[in-house]
Amino acid sequence: MKATFYEGNQSISVGPCIPVPPAAGQVQIRVSYCGICGTDLHIYLGHMDKRVKMPQIMGHEMSGKIEILGDGVTNWKVGDTVTVRPLDACNECPACKAGNSHVCQKLKFIGIDTPGAMQALWTVPAHTLHRLPAGLSMAHAALIEPIAVACHDVRMGAVKAGEYCVVLGGGPIGVLVALVAKSKGAHVLVSEINPFRIELCKQLGLEAVDPRTVDLVEKVNADTGDAGADVVFEVSGSLAGAETMTKLPRVRGRIVLVAIFAQPTPVDLFRFFWREVKLIGARVYEPQDFDEAIALLAAGEVPFTKIITDVYPMSQLKKGFEEMASGGNVMKILIDCAEV
């Protein structure tokens, strides 16, 4: 079979790979499609060389069909269409014992800490599987994992109908957060500087502005009668986003921190005191978030699939990374793992 390999220094190769037979409690999946995630881009750019084991098979936003069942696997059969919740928890640490295995203190993220989905046949623990509904496009199903991220973020923010939400950062996760929040009945404003992404937001029915030309604080205050936003999602991972997020919430508003800040970042703590603002961390997802993502995608009422920019074969994975790294007219790129 074929697989893609990250070999360091922005080098990607496609070559033969020996399938891993599923052990007890595992399944082997024939991968259909895999999305390029922002984390995959960080790996490609060399930002995670100390964590990944090269040559690394990346990828975790996927869809596929079960090829082989390992011993002891029940409730699944060969040919079932699935997606994977790529978290392998220890089930022994205090976080796991408290029911928070998604933030396991020894968590292994499949596709980063272990081989990922950008290969023809992928072996994973059976407990990570989620069933796909009949008739759902396998290409579209590769969006379920990032939609689940958005569902978790919105759930952590306790977004309710009629609330005013601001999303700082209009990349793939930011747009998905905005779409999920809007599906809850919230009014959503997206702050983004990339013209392509601003225009895409508008095509998706979202209000979007460039904070370099629109004063975001004045805009939010004008929209809310000087009250401020109910919920702010910081998805940009930028210093400007960290600075702006505290200026926007209303009294007892919520800030949901979605982006990963690799370095300590200055935050205006006075605003938390002055307005009794809540700061909420949101990391990955839980099973219920995948269930919600699958239901939302299958219903077809939210235009998630419009974020797909291109679909490439595995042989053009490097091209996909180069396009994403350019920061241009790109949102989500899928890799067809059945084609080389």
Image (cartoon, grey):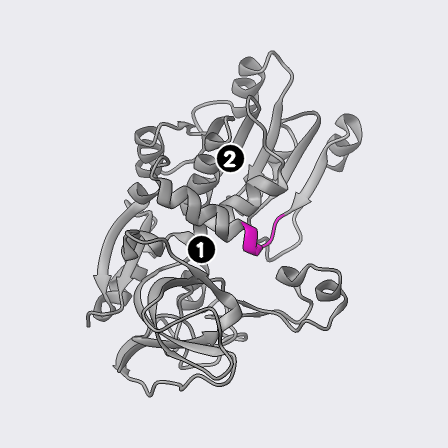
**Magenta highlight on residue 70:** no
Task: Name the residue at 36% across, 53% down.
Answer: 133
Which residue is identified by label 2? 167
Residue matched to label 1? 145
Q: Kindly identify the amino acid type of the residue bearing the numbered disc 2.
A: Val
Q: Mark 1 Cα within 10 Å, few/some/many (few <14, many 20+)?
A: many
The boundaries of the magenta stretch are 282-288
Q: Residues within 10 Å of mark 2 (few under 14, many from 20)?
A: many
Q: Quadrant of residue 311?
A: bottom left
Residue 211 versus residue 28: which sits nearer the camera?
A: 28
Q: Is residue 138 left or right of residue 89?
A: left
Query: Looking at the picture, how far across and down is residue 104, in whole percent?
Result: 66, 65
Residue drawn at 51 percent across, 35 percent down: 167
- The N terminus is located in which quarter? bottom left
- Whether pointer 1 and pointer 2 mark residues with C-beta atoms closer than 8 Å, the reply is no
Residue under the image location 39 percent in, 63 percent down: 82
Magenta region, main secondary structure: loop
In the picture, the disc for residue 87 is none
Cα gap from disc 1 to disc 2, whole angstroms: 19 Å
* Image position of 338 with respect to 214: above or below: below
- Give the secondary structure at mark 1: helix
Which residue of the protein is positioned furthest toward the right in this rendering?
273
